[in-house]
């Protein structure tokens, strides 16, 4: 596929994800990338009903990033601990990415995640 067409596809699918999640979780206020990563963490932990402390929020973001980058070969699921938190092992260090590249990678990963979950198509 032509790189431009691929970028265009990503943009359209990313918008679909943002719109859907913003409507569902933020009364239509536009969620940013971090907020969406956080929601993925909540989804993966499956404990949507409870409040999280600040350090747990960081861990949720971490879980989300591991899960999102797993299909790209950077992390592999390892085990659930006794609190039900998933743990991942690093398979490959992320290459040093510029901020822009990093957000494109995360957006791609998030789009893929929601495609897999059949939330968007």
Image (cartoon, helix red, strand yellow):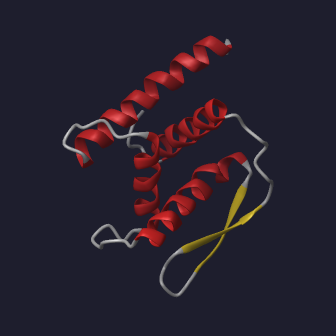
- Left/right placement of residue 50 relative to residue 17 reads left
Q: Quadrant of residue 23?
A: top left
Q: Residue at x 55, y 63 (%)?
A: 63
Taking the view exactly as shown, the residue that stands out farthest to the front is: 54
Taking the view exactly as shown, the residue that stands out farthest to the left is: 27
Q: Could you tell me which quadrant the N terminus lies in?
A: top right
Q: Residue at x 70, y 58 (%)?
A: 75
Q: Could you tell me which quadrant the C terminus lies in?
A: top left
Where is residue 31 shown, x and y percent of the image?
A: 34, 40
Name the residue nearer the viewer: 29 or 54: 54
Where is residue 33 shown, x and y percent of the image?
A: 46, 41
17 over 67 or under it: above or below: above
Q: Quadrant of residue 104?
A: top right
Taking the view exactly as shown, the residue that stands out farthest to the bottom is: 82
Name the residue nearer the viewer: 103 or 47: 103
Q: Residue at x 60, y 19 (%)?
A: 6
């Amino acid at each position: 596929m032509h790189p431009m067409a691929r970028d265009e596809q990503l943009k359209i699918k990313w918008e679909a994800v943002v719109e859907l999640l913003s409507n569902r979780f933020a009364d239509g206020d536009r969620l940013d990338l971090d907020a969406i990563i956080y929601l993925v963490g909540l989804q993966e932990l499956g404990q949507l009903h409870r409040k999280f402390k600040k350090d747990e929020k960081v861990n949720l973001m971490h879980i989300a990033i591991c899960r999102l980058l797993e299909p790209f070969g950077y992390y592999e699921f390892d085990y659930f601990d006794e609190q039900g938190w998933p743990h991942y092992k690093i398979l490959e260090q992320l290459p040093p990415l510029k901020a822009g590249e990093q957000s494109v990678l995360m957006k791609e990963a998030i789009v893929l995640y929601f495609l897999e979950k059949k939330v968007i198509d």
